[in-house]
Image (cartoon, helix red, strand yellow):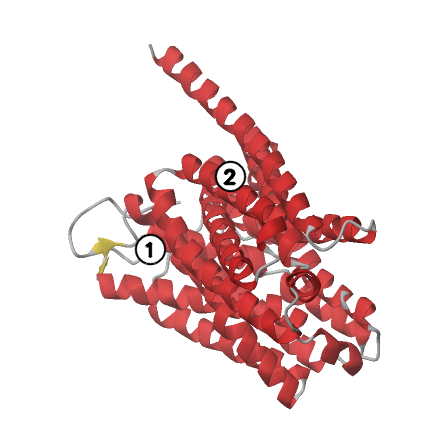
Amino acid sequence: MQTAPSTESPAISAPGAEGAPLSPRRVVLAIGALAIGGFAVGTTEFVTMGLLPEISRGVDVDIPTGGHVISAYAVGVVLGAPVIAALGARLPRRLLAVGLMTAFLVGNALTALAPGYRTLLVARVVAGLPHGAYFGAASLIAASLVAPHVRGRAVSSVMLGLAIANVVGVPAATWLGQHLGWRSAYWAVVAIAALTVVSVLAVVPSAPGRAEATLRNELGALRRPQVLLTLLFGVVGFGGMFAFYSYVAPLVTDVTGMPAGFVPIVLLAFGAGMVAGTALGGRLADRALLPSLFSAVVVMGLVLLGMVLAARHPVSLVAGGFVVAAASSVLAVCLQLRLMETAGEAQMLGAALNHSALNTANALGAWLGGLVIAAGAGYTAPSVVGAGLAVLGLVVLTVSAVLQLRDTRRTAAFAE
């Protein structure tokens, strides 16, 4: 990826902008346009959970069967991210981002139009396919628009759209779907996606792809030990958060002893934590990427373990949920930058793979949490599982750090 030179001047030269410098205002607008796409993606990813009863009734299936609609989107993300990112590495970055958001728009339109359950499943897979690759392209564009020492903040600003969606987009789309029919929520996402396309075309500068990129070379990044270790860390470490988050509703009612109406308050605190953590994650990544990953997973693991007691009181549950969300969001931003760093020339693939890892973590955490609940361990047990996953993630990250240190020393020895 070509990047802007580190400079203190008010204008930063953007790659592909035909030599014309970009003003700080233009940079902010460009990153904001990309973040709107993140808002659209975050809204469609999580609104299905809030509208699951309405969707299930709408396509005439029970709720457990309807839950497969959520899984279908995750399957699309996991499969689409590496393949589309590798195939699209040669394309101009802005063109790729617009194309991916257009495909995302089509997938959500198909969702809103789906006449039955099977077509709905296919539509959700289609909608999920561009998810990871869009964030990959958007992250690379954002990083290329700023000086190297603030790339973390640029990438986190794009991902902030996804975090804000959990506070604003998902509740608003859920309300809309409950009052105007579940399909209206996805039409709203279509409208946001269309706004993204127009905004990106209007304010994001053109930037070339990697003309020398090939599918084999891009996917070859998956043979790098550091890439594989980072992905494994993301799946295992981030799975801890999802083990807790997936069962927060019954935790509130059965353990905290609060009415169901208290669940949105906990979810709001969780969303606020995501916003705070995403904003903080960029700054921490710019200062010290690897130490920030260590710190985030340790904090998340300790708080998840503490939730066994904290969940018994509403105030501590809300506070704990905020911290878990903040730590996990710092983790997500730093993981994105770590993958971009370790993927070498295949940075598009590295940036996209983050979302494959997070969606796999979602499935892993929810599955393991369900197992311990089914075994009769109670609704605080998933938090213990989450803490255990955080410990495993810490082990994987330690191995990655040790290998990196060894390689650095070996390179230094050869240089002498």
From the viewer's side, name the closer residue of 148 and 266. 266
In percent of width and height, residue 5 lies at: 25, 45
Q: Residues within 10 Å of mark 1 (few under 14, many from 20)?
A: some
Give the camera-side residue of 247 and 81. Answer: 247
Q: Write down the residue under mark 1.
A: 16
Neighbour tally class for label 2: few under 14, some 14-19, many 20 plus, Cα within 10 Å: some
Residue visible at 58% across and 31% down?
396
Question: Which residue was labeled with disc 2?
Answer: 298
Three-letter amino acid code of the residue under disc 1: Gly
Q: Is 6 on the left or on the right of 345, as rendered? A: left
Where does the image place residue 231, in percent across and percent down from the top left? 59, 40
39 versus 134 height, above or below: below
Q: Residue at x 48, y 35 (%)?
A: 342
**Residue located at (37% from left, 66% from top):** 32
Any part of residue 381 in sight:
yes
Please state the horizontal and vertical placement of residue 317, each as a whole percent of the image. Answer: 56, 59
In the image, 140 versus 359, the foreground residue is: 359
- Give the residue displayed 60% in from the left and 36% down from the top: 391
- Residue 224 in view: no
Query: Residue farthest to the left?
Result: 9
Mark 2 or mark 1, which is nearer the start of the sequence? 1
Residue 132 lies in quadrant: bottom right
Amino acid on which disc 2 is placed: Val
Name the spot of residue 345 as percent of width and height, x first: 46, 38
Kindly state the secondary structure of the residue where label 1 is placed.
loop
Single out the mark in the foreground, 1 or 2: 2
